[in-house]
C-alpha cells in the first residue's frame, strides 16, 4: 500500500499497486515511501517530498521531477532516461547504476550523491560537474 499525503499530512491518495504511470502528484508528500520497482513513467513529481524514499529499480522514464526534494533517496538502478530533474535536491542520493541519459540535471544539487556506474549521454558530463558544484578550469 502506498499512501500519498499532501503537505499538511492528510492522505490524498492510496494505491495497492506500483503502477502510477501518468499520475499528477504535484507537491505530494512521499517522504520515506517504498516505491522500489514502481512504474512512474511520465509522472508529474514536481516539488514532491521524496526524502529517504526507496526508488530502487523504479522506472521514471520521462518523469517531471523538477524542484523535488530527494535528499537521501535510494535510486540504485533507476531508469531516469529523459527525466527532468532541474532544480531538484539530490544531496546524498544513491544513483549507482542509474540511467541518466537525456535527463535534464541543470540546476540540480548533487553534493554527496553516489554516482558509481551512472549512465550518461555524450556531453552530459558538464551538467553533472556543474550539479556537483565543481568548476572546470582550462
Image (cartoon, grey):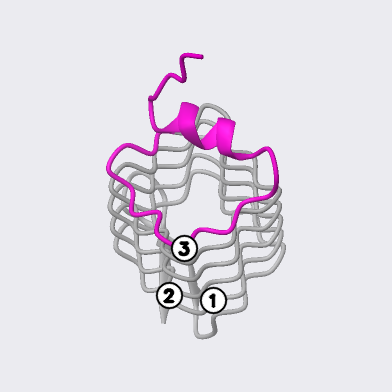
Nearer the observer, 85 or 131: 131
Q: Mark 3 points at which residue?
A: 117
Q: Spatial distance from mark 2 to mark 3, Cα to Cα?
A: 29 Å
Q: Earlier in the sequence, mark 1 or mark 3?
A: 1
Q: Is the magenta stretch mostly helix, strand or loop?
A: loop
Disc 2 versus disc 1: nearer the observer? 1
Taking the spot 46% from the left edge, 41% from the top edge, the residue there is 68
Q: Where is residue 28 in the image (x, y as percent from the top left)?
A: 46, 50
| Picture disc at residue 69 | none
Nearer the observer, 108 or 99: 99
Q: Earlier in the sequence, mark 2 or mark 3?
A: 2
Q: Name the residue under label 2.
A: 2
Residue 65 on the magenta segment: no
Q: Which residue lies furthest to the top in this view?
A: 138
Nearer the observer, 21 or 127: 127
Taking the spot 60% from the left edge, 58% from the top edge, the residue there is 80
Q: What element carries label 2?
A: strand
| Magenta span | 109-138
Q: Where is residue 70 in the image (x, y as percent from the top left)?
A: 38, 48
Determine which quarter of the picture holds residue 91. Answer: top left
Determine which quarter of the picture holds residue 4. Answer: bottom left
Q: Position of residue 2 (x, y in %)?
A: 42, 75
Q: What is the crowding at mark 1: few (fewer than 14 residues within 10 Å), some, or many (at least 20)?
A: many
Taking the spot 34% from the left edge, 52% from the top edge, the residue there is 93
Q: What is the crowding at mark 3: few (fewer than 14 residues within 10 Å), some, or many (at least 20)?
A: few
Lateral position of residue 34 relative to residue 138, left or right:
left
Dot 1 and dot 3 residues touching (CB under 8 Å):
no
Dot 2 and dot 1 residues touching (CB under 8 Å):
yes
Lateral position of residue 33 relative to residue 98, left or right:
left
Q: Mark 1 points at which residue?
A: 38
Amino acid at each position: 500500500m502506498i499512501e500519498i499525503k499532501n503537505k499538511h499530512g492528510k492522505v490524498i491518495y492510496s494505491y495497492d499497486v506500483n503502477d502510477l504511470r501518468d499520475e499528477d502528484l504535484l507537491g505530494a508528500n512521499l517522504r520515506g515511501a517504498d516505491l522500489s520497482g514502481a512504474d512512474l513513467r511520465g509522472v508529474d513529481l514536481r516539488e514532491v517530498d521524496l526524502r529517504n524514499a526507496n526508488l530502487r529499480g523504479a522506472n521514471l522514464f520521462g518523469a517531471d521531477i523538477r524542484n523535488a526534494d530527494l535528499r537521501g533517496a535510494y535510486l540504485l538502478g533507476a531508469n531516469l532516461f529523459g527525466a527532468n530533474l532541474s532544480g531538484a535536491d539530490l544531496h546524498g542520493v544513491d544513483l549507482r547504476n542509474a540511467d541518466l541519459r537525456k535527463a535534464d540535471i541543470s540546476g540540480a544539487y548533487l553534493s554527496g550523491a553516489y554516482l558509481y556506474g551512472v549512465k550518461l549521454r555524450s556531453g552530459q558530463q558538464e551538467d553533472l560537474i556543474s550539479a556537483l558544484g565543481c568548476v572546470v578550469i582550462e
